[in-house]
Image (cartoon, grey):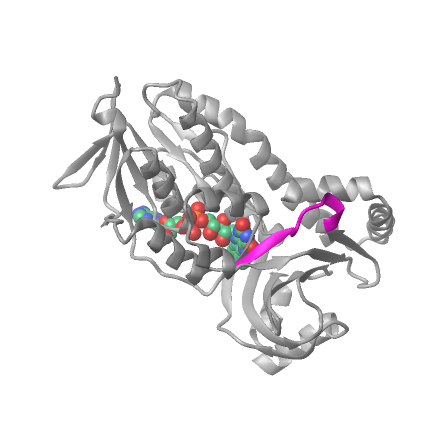
């Protein structure tokens, strides 16, 4: 028999992962106490993997969300010479798409509809304490306290909960800043994404709809300084040098957002009755568009383990250890892949550049290798 406390879960953090986790746990009958800061929706566009989209369907997302998704059917990857390329195609793995683009605002509208406007967040003051006892965990403020079987922290890459419970992440600073914005373009190219691994930056061009693409430009500090001092017209000229063969009349069409880039990994994703999920548990380079997908997979695997119904209390070590074990490989592989690609492509030695050229040519000729790469990404 599950007792009252065993059915109670505290979630901290109201980003996309916190909200999706809330929806999933609510659907399993848990009583959720959700603490979040006021939501600041940015104009971000995410590439969702097909498995994330399938899961959102199973969560009961409205059909309008899926109708608004735009498909990426292929991706062309270039090295710094912009001469050698590899094309990854959804058809190579017999799938309708490699990924689906979604705007953060549409995502939030869909979440709201799925909640039936019933979600109820409490504001979290920064002044809180977490106390673990044998059978429960307590979130303590100076004038009140909340008890639950587990606290799940989804409070992002700079997680305050993680700091409070003294899980110290291993941090790698990429010494890069990502610049993200939308670009109006003239082109017949549709449903194709581009990724340019350049000497001073990594440029991702992701299709949103005909005539509109999303740019994620991860720049080393020096190049970022240069871009940051340019007006929009001059940035458009810089872009034209890279993507001018594919897009004409390019015009910056949104506010530019900036993100410092680093990688966080933790030895253990839980301590006592506190679990880290999403960016609080792992933060990776955005080059592969996988951070949110990794967080969604955290929730999918939590759901799978909950559905096994072989536990009494999800705050107990046994349950959390099993979950940690199944997540470890996926998270470390994705971290390793993005770290490794950034490392290789940022090398400027002629030997490494020659190896990249050979490697890309081999990859482009091997359907099997491409299939493996696509399968991992989607
Ligand atoms: C430029 C860029 C492009 C990206 N593109 C993609 C992509 O195409 N596809 C993809 O899968 N991923 C992408 N990502 C990664 C993705 O944005 C993140 O992985 C995802 O947003 C993480 O969600 P989250 O809810 O875990 O964290 P966050 O979005 O950081 O949310 C954390 C929430 O916790 C709240 N919070 C923080 N502290 C507290 C506190 N003390 N109390 C209460 N609340 C708190 C914050 O206000 C916030 O609402 C990209 C990232 C970047 C930087």
Q: Quadrant of the C terminus?
A: top right
* 92 falls in the magenta region: yes
The image position of residue 203, as x and y in percent, is: 66, 62
Seen at 79% across and 41% down, the residue is: 369
Judge whether residue 122 can be spotted in this image.
yes
Seen at 56% across and 60% down, the residue is: 177
The image position of residue 155, as x and y in percent, is: 37, 45
Seen at 61% across and 40% down, the residue is: 334
Above or below, comparing residue 294 to residue 239 in the picture: above
User: Is residue 212 shown left or right of residue 16?
Assistant: right
Give the magenta part as a residue range. Answer: 91-102
- Residue 376 falls in image quadrant: top right
The image position of residue 225, as x and y in percent, is: 59, 69
- Residue 205 falls in image quadrant: bottom right
Q: Quadrant of the N terminus?
A: top left
Q: Residue furthest left?
A: 143
Of residues 300 and 168, the one nearer the viewer is 300
């Amino acid at each position: 028999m599950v007792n009252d406390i065993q059915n109670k879960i505290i979630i901290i953090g109201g980003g996309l992962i916190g909200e999706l986790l809330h929806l999933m746990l609510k659907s399993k009958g848990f009583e959720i106490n959700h603490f979040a800061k006021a939501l600041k929706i940015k104009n971000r566009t995410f590439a969702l993997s097909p498995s994330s989209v399938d899961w959102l369907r199973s969560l009961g997302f409205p059909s309008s969300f899926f109708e608004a998704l735009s498909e990426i059917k292929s991706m062309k990857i270039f090295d710094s010479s912009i001469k050698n390329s590899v094309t990854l195609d959804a058809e190579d793995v017999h799938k309708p798409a490699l990924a689906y683009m979604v705007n953060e605002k549409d995502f939030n509208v869909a979440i709201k509809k799925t909640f039936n406007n019933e979600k109820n967040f409490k504001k979290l003051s920064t002044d809180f304490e977490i106390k673990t006892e044998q059978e429960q965990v307590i979130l303590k403020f100076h004038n009140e306290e909340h008890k639950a079987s587990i606290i799940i922290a989804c409070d992002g890459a700079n997680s305050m909960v993680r700091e409070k419970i003294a899980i110290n992440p291993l941090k790698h600073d990429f010494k890069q800043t990502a610049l993200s914005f939308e670009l109006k373009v003239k082109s017949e190219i549709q449903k194709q994404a581009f990724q340019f691994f350049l000497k001073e930056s990594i440029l991702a061009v992701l299709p949103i709809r005909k005539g509109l693409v999303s740019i994620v430009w991860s720049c080393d500090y020096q190049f970022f300084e240069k871009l940051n001092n340019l007006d929009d017209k001059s940035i458009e000229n810089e872009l034209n040098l890279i993507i001018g063969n594919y897009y004409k009349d390019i015009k910056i069409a949104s506010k530019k957002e900036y993100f410092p880039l680093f990688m966080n990994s933790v030895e253990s994703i839980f301590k006592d009755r506190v679990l880290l999920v999403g960016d609080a548990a792992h933060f990776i380079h955005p080059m592969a568009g996988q951070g949110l997908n990794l967080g969604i997979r955290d929730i999918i695997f939590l759901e799978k383990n909950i559905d096994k119904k072989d536990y009494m209390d999800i705050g107990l070590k046994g349950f959390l250890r099993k979950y940690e074990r199944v997540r470890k490989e996926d998270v470390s592989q994705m971290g390793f892949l993005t770290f490794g690609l950034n490392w290789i492509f940022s090398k400027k030695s002629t030997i490494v550049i020659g190896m990249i050229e050979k490697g890309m040519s081999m990859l482009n000729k091997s359907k099997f290798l491409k299939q493996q790469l696509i399968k991992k990404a989607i």
